Image: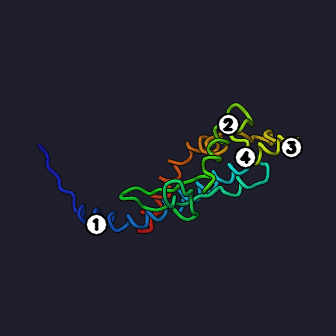
């Protein structure tokens, strides 16, 4: 039975360990870029009455449950690299309802701005090109197949720098 030895394996392991911070930094940068692209497309699809809902779209880190998302780069949670995309801030329930409004522009509350506008005879343009429900989910689904290769390439860039 032949035997062989590999010289330099310990050095290779050390070099890879040293490159991990660079790889994680590159992955964070790519994840942020991807998330911004999704949010940009999403803002083209969110239904608009006054523009308030559209202006609440953020890419960043959720501050606390129910508080929405504060803009910022990806963050680390243990071994994971995370980023949150969302709308609404204090009006998160409204944003969620509009996002899931598959039956059309019928609000559960007469106090919501677009409900008042409809009652006053104003027509809401739910048919702005590609606007309507699933305004965040659909752009994400459309781009999701590009994420893994992009993150792989980003990690490789980081390892090459190390």
In this view, the residue in front, 30 or 65, is 65
Q: Secondary structure at mark 3?
A: loop
In the picture, the disc for residue 14 is 1
Relative depth, front residue between 19 and 92: 92
Q: Residue at x 34, y 68 (%)?
A: 18
Labelled pair 4, 1 in contact (Cβ < 8 Å): no
* Left or right of 35 in this view: 124: right
Residue 139 against residue 89 in the figure, above or below:
above
Measured Cα–Cα span from mark 3 to mark 4 = 13 Å
| For marks 3 and 2 on the same chain, the one whose residue lies earlier in the sequence | 2
Q: CA distance from mark 4 to mark 2?
A: 14 Å
Query: Mark 4 or mark 1, which is nearer to you?
Result: 4
Characterize the local packing of mark 2: few (<14), some (14-19) or many (20 or more) Cα atoms within 10 angstroms.
some
Neighbor class of circle 4 (other Cα within 10 Å; few <14, some 14-19, many 20+) is few
| Residue for badge 4 | 112
**CA–CA distance between discs 3 and 2?**
21 Å
* Mark nearer the N terminus (3 vs 4): 4
Residue underneath mark 2: 101
Q: Which of the two residues, 93 or 12, is positioned nearer the viewer here?
A: 93
Q: What is the number of the mark on residue 136? A: none
CA gap between label 1 and label 3 equals: 69 Å
Quarter of the image for the C terminus: give it.
bottom left
**Residue in view at x 14 percent, y 49 percent:** 3
Is disc 4 placed on a helix, strand or loop? Answer: loop
* Viewer-side residue, 146 vs 162: 146
State the mark number for residue 120: 3
Does label 4 or label 1 sit earlier along the sequence? 1
- Check if mark 2's residue and mark 1's residue have beta carbons within 8 Å: no
């Amino acid at each position: 039975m032949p035997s062989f030895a590999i010289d330099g394996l310990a050095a290779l392991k050390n070099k890879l360990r040293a490159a991990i911070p660079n790889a994680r930094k590159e992955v964070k940068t790519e994840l942020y870029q991807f998330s911004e692209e999704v949010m940009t497309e999403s803002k083209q699809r969110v239904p608009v009455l006054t523009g308030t809902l559209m202006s609440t779209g953020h890419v960043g880190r959720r501050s606390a449950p129910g508080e929405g998302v504060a803009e910022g780069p990806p963050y680390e949670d243990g071994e994971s690299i995370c980023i949150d995309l969302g709308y609404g801030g204090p009006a998160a329930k409204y944003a969620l309802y509009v996002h899931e409004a598959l039956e059309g522009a019928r609000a559960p509350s007469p106090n919501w701005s677009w409900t008042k506008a409809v009652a006053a005879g104003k027509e809401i343009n739910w048919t702005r090109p590609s606007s309507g429900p699933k305004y965040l989910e659909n752009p994400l689904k459309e781009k999701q197949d590009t994420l893994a290769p992009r993150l792989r390439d980003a990690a490789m860039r980081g390892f090459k720098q190390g």
